[in-house]
Amino acid sequence: MISLIPTPIGNLEDITLRALRLLREADLIAAEDTRTSGILLKHHEISTKQTSLHQHNEHKRVHSLLDQVEQEGLKLAVISDAGTPGISDPGFLLVREAVKRGIKVETLPGATAFVPALVSSGLPCDRFIFEGFLPIKKGRQTRLKELTEEKRTMVFYESPHRLLRTLKDFIATFGPDRGVCLSREISKLHEEHHRGSLEDLLNEFEHGKKVKGELVLILAGQD
């Protein structure tokens, strides 16, 4: 049995009772960063053994972990640093191989950054597409060009040091008047939502305003 368990994206209380129970009952927790997850587990007094499963070792670790699940009846819990495993985080390769092997996989509902950002944006959220992180170099302009005719609300993840570049790329692709909302530090003490046009946000952050923390950009579709 493999359980994919969402973990808080900010406030440590944003975790379900079922998630806590399964983390305690698991034989092993595969975590993106055992140091980060150790803080959460200690907060909730969970002492289950951990092992690392991240983007740099996932290809190597998947088969050995699944062998343990199959041969030893191991109850494996999978978590990322924050949010739901597999959503811009490790987890996909493990699930894909588990499905091929016929291993039961359960995924718990829970925290993920883009849902509260989308709902809080004030932009249409009945139909949307999730883009995650844009390619940094190769394929970036091609992907943006493909989105020029997109009518649905678009959801992106971005890091603070690439924010200005992304806003400028958006303006060049979608025009300065396109509506956007930038959400940061969701569920944390300093949660913020910056709404306006792409030009408004570029002016706000290009002239001295510093931005930190995880960012979600919600971009209006073509009108």
Image: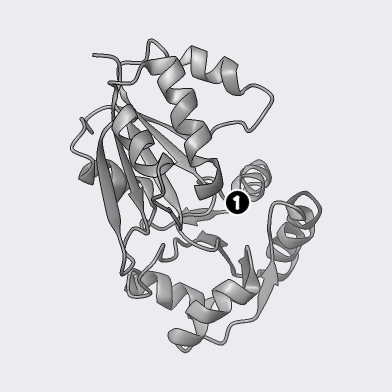
Q: Residue at x 60, y 45 (%)?
A: 92
Q: Quadrant of the C terminus?
A: top left
Q: Residue furthest top?
A: 149
Q: Compared with residue 22, is residue 90 higher up or lower down, i.e. above or below? A: above
User: Circle 1 — which element?
Assistant: loop
Q: Quadrant of the N terminus?
A: bottom right
Q: Residue 188: x, y in percent?
A: 34, 66
Q: Compared with residue 151, is residue 138 higher up or lower down, i.e. above or below? A: below
How many marks can you see? 1
Of 196 and 209, the residue lying toward us: 209
Q: Residue 37: x, y in percent?
A: 55, 73
Q: Residue 128: x, y in percent?
A: 32, 29
Quarter of the image where one finds residue 2? bottom right
Q: Residue furthest left?
A: 122
Q: Residue at x 31, y 65 (%)?
A: 190
Of 138 and 125, the residue lying toward us: 138
Q: Compared with residue 96, is residue 43 higher up or lower down, i.e. above or below? A: below
Estimate how packed mark 1 is, as few (under 14), some (14 to 19) or many (20 or more) residues with alpha carbons within 10 Å: many
Residue type, numbered disc 1: Gly
Q: Residue at x 64, y 67 (%)?
A: 33
Task: Give the residue at mark 1.
Answer: 91
Quarter of the image where one finds residue 139? top right
Q: Residue at x 63, y 76 (%)?
A: 35
Q: Compared with residue 69, is residue 208 higher up or lower down, i.e. above or below? A: above
From the viewer's perspective, is 25 left or right of 112? right
Of 183 and 155, the residue lying toward us: 183
From the viewer's perspective, is 131 left or right of 198? right
